[in-house]
Amino acid sequence: MAKLWEGLASGEINRAAESFNASISFDKRLIFEDIEGSIAHVQMLGKQGIIEEAEAKEIASALLSIKEDLVSGALAVDETAEDVHTFVEQTLTERLGALGKKLHTARSRNDQVALDMKLFARKTAEETIGLLLSLVSALTDKAEEYKGAVMSGYTHLQRAQPITFGHHLCCYAFQFLRDVGRLKDAKKRLNLSPIGCAALAGTTYPTDRRFEASLLGFDGITENSLDGVSDRDYLVELLAAFSLISVHLSRLSEELVLWSSWEFKYIELSQDFTTGSSIMPQKKNPDLAELTRGKTGRVVGSLVAMLTMLKSLPLAYNKDMQEDKEIFFDAADTVKACLTIMTPMIASMKARTDKMLQAAKEGFINATDLADYLTKKGVPFREAYKITGAIVKTAAAENKTLEDLSLEEYKAFNALFEKDLYEAIALETCVNKRTSEGGTAVSEVEKQIAILRERVKNV
Ligand code: ARG
């Protein structure tokens, strides 16, 4: 295809340079945004009398037919075009002749590409929010199912205090809900239309930027034309949100990998999300969780790549910015794919509550409650902590749990021990006494579940 700027270039165009410069191989993904933007633009041109109303209608319907032909497969993107904007405009001109050439009045590829990316980014943010909400719901449903399943909570990956599996899952649901908030917030800031900024300085035509913006569902327009064409902050914000989503996904994935190992066996992942080994018949590998964990690097890398591309760019448009697309597309595709996989993986996961309880019984995770028992009887906490430490040491040396020690043995450490201590250190008691807001007691987890459901409903 002929270059838009042909006639200015001198001599043979080197093919390698041409392909290095071209973006059609990846920005063709913006074709529907480009057409949507062009239709709005031509409507504005007609309304303002910059071109005839009848001409505007004809151009708009030709653009629609290009869209339809792309959808039906009657038209394919010509990859010899420099970029998607060139392809759409040249196809239009092939169909309409000279009239097609009027479309680009009062705009530049600089505001056009900024518009296309904003439309694409907005749609991506919305899709990602939808996927996050499904994951939050899947986690919440699982939390409900296992709200009474006692397991050990960990710090430093050492058994710490008893919690429930439901409580643990709610924690992830809250993380992903915050990610929804970040995307919604970024969407608010990005939803200002750059179209009409033209190349950088605005235009001499009597355009109506606000009309065009409203046709495209924007809340308003960018208030400085240089800013409109050179701003890519919204991509950085979304990539930062994607990075955090990936980090959350990778923390969850890591736990799925650990929990499905023989060392833990807290969960069984559905066969659909595991693979076998080519030589070890007993293997059930959590590949999808591992891949999700592994893809985090790509997404976080995208954020760094985008920031580094933007760093030190003078105003306004620079070709460096063409790099924003592959970076953003890859991160968006990756995050959406990971979320799409994680939701059914969680929904189909089964907990081995027997294994969880067994492990919870073995780690002295009710030691804090034993110390609290003495504290409630008037022993200062530091003192109670020391006594409990000595009891744990004795029990461990005898290969016993705290429940296994007799009342006489307890009394030898402190006379205040009575037989109600066994009730106080029962794992169920430890869990259900933690009724502080946000705590692990079933009654509190039920409240968390209700909060999560309510928030998902009201997004
Ligand atoms: N393909 C270009 C990009 O993605 C479109 C904008 C071209 N503008 C220009 N002044 N060369 O950034």
Image (cartoon, rainbow, N blue to C red):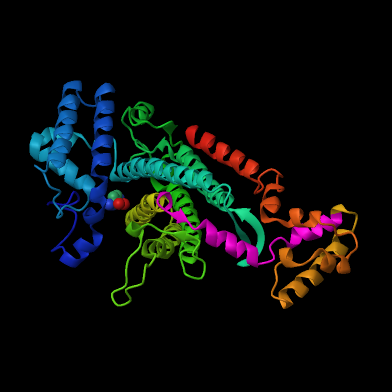
Describe residue 15's horizontal placement relative to residue 334 as left or right: left
- The range drawn in magenta is 346-375
Q: Quadrant of residue 99?
A: top left
Residue 406: image location, x then y, percent: 79, 66
Viewer-side residue, 284 vs 324:
284
Report whether 241 appears left or right of 447. left
Which residue is located at x 34 percent, y 40 percent? 119
Comparing 339 with 103, the one in front is 339
Q: Main secondary structure of the magenta part?
A: helix
- Residue 386 in view, yes or no: no
Q: Could you say where residue 231 lies in the image, as x and y percent from the top left?
A: 43, 47
Residue 11, compared with residue 176, is above or below; it is below
Q: Position of residue 22 (x, y in %)?
A: 23, 57
x, y percentage for residue 235? 42, 49
Q: Is there any visible trace of residue 359 in the rendered image?
A: yes
Using residue 388 as the reference point, say whether residue 351 is left or right of it: left
Q: Quadrant of residue 212?
A: top left
At 53% across and 62% down in the image, what residue appears? 355
Does the magenta portion include 40?
no
Q: Is residue 410 above or below residue 125?
A: below
Q: Decide: is 332 above or below 188.
A: below
**What residue sits 56% from the left and 47% below the top?**
147
The reply to whether the magenta stretch includes residue 363 is yes
